[in-house]
Amino acid sequence: MTREARRLLAALGQPETWALIDPTDPSSVLIHRRRSGVSVGAGRFAAATADALVREDLASWQQAASGRRTLQLTSAGEAHRRRIASPDADLAFLHQHRETETATVETATGPTRVRIDTEESPLGWLRRRRDRNGEPMIDETAFQAGERLRTDIMLAGLLPGVTARWDAMPKTGGPASPGEATDRMVAARQRLRHAFDAIGSDFSDLLLDLCGFLKGLEQIERERQWPARSAKVVIRLALGRLAEHYGIESTARGPAASRGIRAWQAVVIEGGRI
């Protein structure tokens, strides 16, 4: 693979990025990237380089809703991009088949930098997948809202433990009594209560399955007996309402637009549940 082909492959691997034929110069392709709902130019490559990726099945031309053809990575192209971009040659095969990234996560002892498997979370899957119009299934606003909820669910200790315990009294992932709850755990449970009250019980159950138990769309549809491909529509609505509660918006509008938590109140914990 040529150096320019590698650069094009890396460019197409960025979120909400695609390429199209330059209408003024058919021998070139233009890279476009969506930023805050606006498409902006992000580079130019030779059309021959794009054709080389298509021949290797690393990219393909797709028909957009506007009628234009857009160049996007195939699953093989995305896997190849991860392999050549691996920071560790010994882990290149792992990165090829699993998408990982370095991120800061909240733990019981505070923020920690770790390498995470982005395919573990259905939220990451939804953000990477695109619909027939080339749009991501959920935008960055919805993704950040879901990740914030996921962090609070983890910190609150609401999910049952899945590892073996050898003591006489098995218990769930949360504390057995209110006395065992840390201040961080109590705060997370309070934030969850505020969020669940704001979005309603139906959306709360759905997002608990999606962000907490990491259930995929097919499993959610099967368990709720919903029609196929209907879960993504409801999830978009639920995450949109959650983002509104958190005050997360795609464009900055000043502090007055935030509808997040402004005051802390006491919470009563009964049996380790909110």
Image (cartoon, helix red, strand yellow):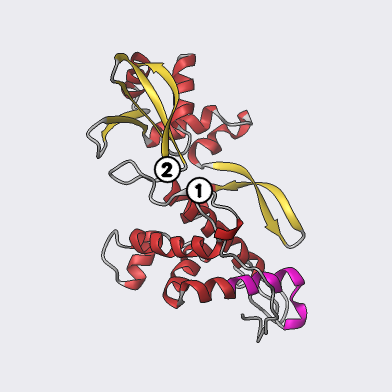
Q: Where, quadrant-wise, is the N terminus in this rendering?
A: top left
Seen at 58% across and 75% down, the residue is 193
In the picture, the disc for residue 10 is none
Neighbour class for label 2 at 10 Å: few (<14), some, many (≥20)?
A: few
Q: Which mark is residue 251?
A: 1
User: Image check: 264 left or right of 214?
Assistant: right
Q: Say above or below: 72 vs 142.
A: above
Most extreme residue toward the left is 67
- Rounded to the nearest whole Å, what is the CA distance between mark 2 and mark 1? 9 Å
Instruction: Name the residue rendered at 32%, 46% in the picture.
Output: 131
The reply to whether the magenta stretch includes residue 15 is no
Residue most extreme to the bottom = 270
207, above or below 98, in the image: below
**In this orientation, which residue lies closer to the viewer: 170 or 158?**
158
Front residue (pair 123, 145): 145
Q: How many labels were placed on the picture?
A: 2
Query: Which amino acid lies under the numbered mark 1 shown in the image of this protein?
Result: Thr
State whether residue 167 appears in this view: yes
Q: Quadrant of residue 255?
A: bottom right
Residue type pointed to by label 2: Gly
Mark 2 in CB contact with mark 1 (< 8 angstroms): yes
In the figure, residue 71 lies in which quadrant? top left
State the image coordinates of residue 45 (x, y, percent, origin top left).
41, 17
The magenta-colored residue range is 178-192
Between 25 and 117, the residue placed more toward the observer is 25
Instruction: Answer whether residue 157 is visible to the viewer in this image.
Output: no
Disc 2 is placed on an element classified as loop
Please give the residue where the numbered disc 2 appears in the rendered image: 37
How far from the left and from the top, in percent, is residue 15? 47, 38
Identified at 46% across, 75% down, the residue is: 200
How far across and how far down the image is residue 41, in percent? 43, 27
The C terminus: image quadrant: bottom right
